[in-house]
Image (spheres, rainbow, N blue to C red):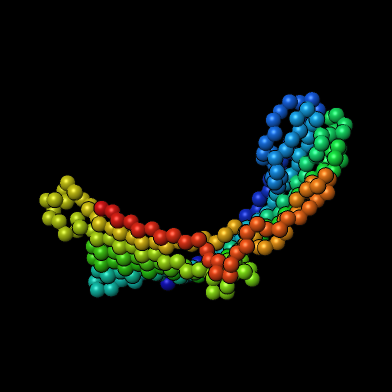
Amino acid sequence: MKVTARSGIDFYADRGQIRLSQGSWTSTGDTGVPGILYPWNGTKVGAYISGRTQGFSINSDLLFTGTKKFLDDKFQVEYLAGGTIYYRRDDNLSGQTTGGISVPGYFSLNASVNAARVYESTNAEQANSLFGRLGLSWNNLIYVDATLRNDWVSRLANPVVAKSDRSYLYPAVSGSFVVSELMPESVKEWMNLLKVRSSWTSAKTAPPVYKINEVFTVNPGTWLDYNGATAPHTSYLSSYSPNSYTTTEFGL
């Protein structure tokens, strides 16, 4: 048996700006600036948009792997069992002028003609997983492989989701039969491999971060220069469960 423990951390950061001088003619559109949620409008009156996003992710694994052979090495068993803890956090901060810039050439939120729009958000999630794999083979002729995984995700840790639906299990199984191993040597000279295979896979995915949270959304400039909050348009039932799909494959 082989035991492997590993952990990695990834840091990332992105920053962007748009500076539009007074008198410039340009159409509105998405800014491409990190953290900006809405299109911008700076036609002829000037605009300044600045945003940054930064975050990190940590991924830690513990794996147990091994291979055993029996019956004069004709029967082989491969196994893997392990667990993973994944954590990610993003912090976003951005702002943009509204109504143009008051001083030509002065690109700052302080130069906004009307109250500048400022956005700040934090996204964080964690997923804990247990998984396993079992591979069986007989005399280089028959192969069977099965996997099983269970995830517990923070995306579903919400009162609207039943506790029984806050984790999800998804299996997969595949098999193959190497027909060419039974062929005469004269046939193997021009067909060295002929295999029949099949597989069935089940996969599940959780909704995006905070997607099912029933909270108010704060919108800048809802009424004149005042911010406002809106209620969610969708209500989720307690029977909410992850998206799931299955795939079946046959091949020769």
Residue 43: x and y in percent read 75, 30
Residue at image point 70% right, 46% down: 37
Q: Quadrant of the N terminus?
A: bottom left
**Number of numbered discs overlaid on the protein picture:** 0
Nearest the eye: 177 or 225: 225
Nearest the eye: 240 or 209: 240
Residue at image point 76% right, 39% down: 49
Residue 7 in view, yes or no: no
Residue 96: x and y in percent read 78, 41
Residue at image point 70% right, 34% down: 28
Quarter residue 106 falls in: top right
Nearest the eye: 12 or 149: 149
Residue at image point 33% right, 62% down: 174
Describe residue 202's horizontal placement relative to residue 123 as left or right. Answer: left
Describe residue 123's horizontal placement relative to residue 226 as left or right. Answer: left
The answer to whether residue 202 is above or below residue 45 is below
Nearest the eye: 223 or 62: 223
Residue 239: x and y in percent read 55, 69
Describe residue 79's horizontal placement relative to residue 22 as left or right. Answer: left
The answer to whether residue 99 is above or below residue 208 is above
Describe residue 130's horizontal placement relative to residue 72 as left or right. Answer: right
The answer to whether residue 36 is above or below residue 27 is below
Residue 43 in view, yes or no: yes
Residue 250: x and y in percent read 30, 56
